[in-house]
């Protein structure tokens, strides 16, 4: 089998499964949660700072939901730390997308949050599944 069919097969097994589908559904909830929190924080903070504070608040909720609903692993401090580390790529991508969409494109905080989630979600799933929760 050549490299491209192997890559396609790997993508299918990684993204076309129960875990990724649940992760995406939960991601929609988490994105709305993050968008609402970021929007609320933007009333008292600069909008880029509101993204960061909203991210960390919604991240705790996301960790608990990922633990119980998707990966069915008990939440522990070690897993939470690994979860936070797994979200570094998402936060980096999300912060950059948010910075560009808010400051250069002048879009809303909520739109910026949704674009950040769509652009960083798949990478986050791979890192989280392998690193934060391990494979079942």
Image (spheres, rainbow, N blue to C red):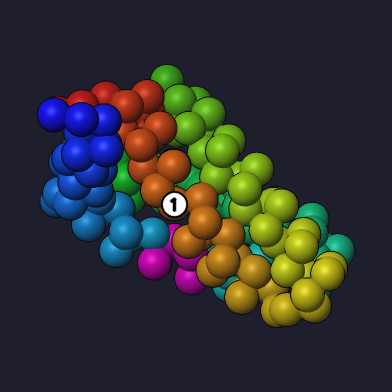
Neighbours of disc 1 within 10 Å: few (<14), some (14-19), many (20+): some
**Residue 4 horizontal/vertical position (percent):** 27, 38
Q: Residue at x 44, y 42 (%)?
A: 123
In depth, the one of 54 and 121 nearer the eye is 121
Is residue 31 a member of the stretch shown in magenta?
Answer: yes
Q: Is residue 40 left or right of residue 65?
A: right
**Residue 9 horizontal/vertical position (percent):** 17, 40
Kindly tell me whether residue 47 is visible in this rendering: yes
- Which residue extends farthest front? 2
Dominant SS of magenta comes to helix
Residue under numbered circle 1: 121
Is residue 46 a member of the stretch shown in magenta?
Answer: no
Quadrant of image for the C terminus? top left
Q: Is residue 24 left or right of residue 40?
A: left
* Residue stretch in magenta: 28-32
Quadrant assignment, res 74: top left
**Up-down: is 11 above or below 136?**
below
Quadrant assignment, res 27: bottom left
**Residue 49 horizontal/vertical position (percent):** 79, 55
């Amino acid at each position: 089998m050549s490299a491209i069919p192997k890559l396609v097969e790997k993508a299918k097994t990684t993204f076309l499964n129960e875990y990724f589908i649940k992760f995406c559904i939960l991601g929609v909830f988490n994105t709305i949660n993050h968008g609402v929190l970021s929007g609320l924080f933007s009333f008292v903070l600069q909008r880029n700072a509101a993204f960061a504070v909203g991210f960390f608040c919604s991240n705790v909720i996301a960790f608990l939901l990922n633990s119980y609903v998707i990966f069915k692993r008990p939440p522990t401090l070690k897993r939470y730390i690994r979860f936070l580390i797994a979200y570094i790529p998402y936060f980096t991508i999300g912060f950059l997308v948010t910075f560009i969409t808010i400051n250069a494109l002048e879009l809303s905080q909520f739109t910026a949050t949704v674009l950040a989630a769509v652009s960083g979600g798949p990478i986050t799933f791979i890192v989280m599944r392998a690193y934060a929760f391990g494979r079942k």
